[in-house]
C-alpha cells in the first residue's frame, strides 16, 4: 500500500499507513523568526529505523558540511516519542531524520 498525505505546502510519501519521507515548503509551526532568517523555505524529513540511526544521520550530515540545527533528542511538542535531529545543508535547506517509536 502506498500512502500519500498533504499538509499545507507539505506532502508525505511512504508505504503503509504513515509516510516515511516528507518534503515541504514555507514556514512550519515549529520554526521561529530566528530560524527563518537562516534557512530556505524547504524542509525535508526522513523516517529513521531507530534513535541510533537519527544520531548517525546527524553526525554524517555534520561531517559532510551540514550545520547543526537541532541535535538528536526528543521533541515531545509533536508527540511523546518524537525523536529527531535537524541540520542545514550547505544551501540552507532544513533536513531532518525522525524516529517515532518508544525505545
Image (spheres, helix red, strand yellow):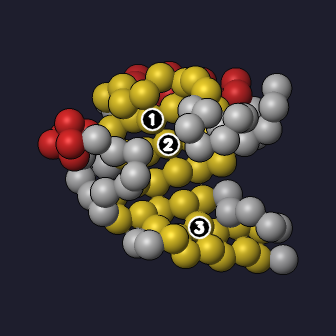
Label 1 SS: strand
Decide if residue 73 is on the left or right side of residue 48: left
> On residue 103, which mark appears?
none
Residue 57 in view in this figure = no
In the image, residue 97 above or below residue 62: below
Q: CA distance from mark 2 to mark 1?
A: 4 Å
CB of mark 2 within 8 Å of CB of mark 1? yes
Q: Position of residue 13 (x, y in %)?
A: 63, 69
Tell me if mark 2 has few (under 14), some (14-19) or many (20+) residues whose alpha carbon lies within 10 angstroms of its own. Answer: many
Q: CA distance from mark 2 to mark 3?
A: 13 Å
Disc 3: which residue: 12
Decide if residue 102 is on the left or right side of residue 96: right
Disc 1: which residue: 86
Name which of mark 2 and mark 3 comes first in the sequence. Answer: 3
Q: Quadrant of residue 12?
A: bottom right
The residue sitting at 38% across, 55% down in the picture is 28
Could you tell me which quadrant the N terminus lies in?
A: bottom right
Decide if residue 98 is on the left or right side of residue 89: right
Q: Quadrant of residue 42?
A: bottom left
The residue sitting at 82% across, 26% down in the picture is 103
Residue furthest left in the image: 37
Residue 41 in view in this figure = yes
Q: Position of residue 72 (x, y in %)?
A: 55, 24
The residue sitting at 36% across, 26% down in the picture is 68
Amino acid at each position: 500500500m502506498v500512502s500519500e498525505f498533504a499538509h499545507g505546502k507539505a506532502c508525505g510519501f511512504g508505504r503503509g499507513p504513515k509516510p516515511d519521507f516528507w518534503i515541504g515548503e514555507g514556514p512550519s509551526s515549529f520554526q521561529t523568526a530566528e530560524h527563518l532568517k537562516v534557512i530556505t523555505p524547504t524542509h525535508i524529513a526522513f523516517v529513521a529505523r531507530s534513535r541510533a540511526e537519527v544520531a548517525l544521520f546527524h553526525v554524517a550530515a555534520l561531517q559532510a558540511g551540514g550545520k547543526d540545527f537541532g541535535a538528536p533528542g526528543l521533541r515531545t511538542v509533536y508527540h511523546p516519542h518524537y525523536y529527531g535531529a535537524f541540520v542545514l545543508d550547505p544551501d540552507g535547506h532544513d533536513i531532518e531524520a525522525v524516529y517515532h517509536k518508544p525505545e
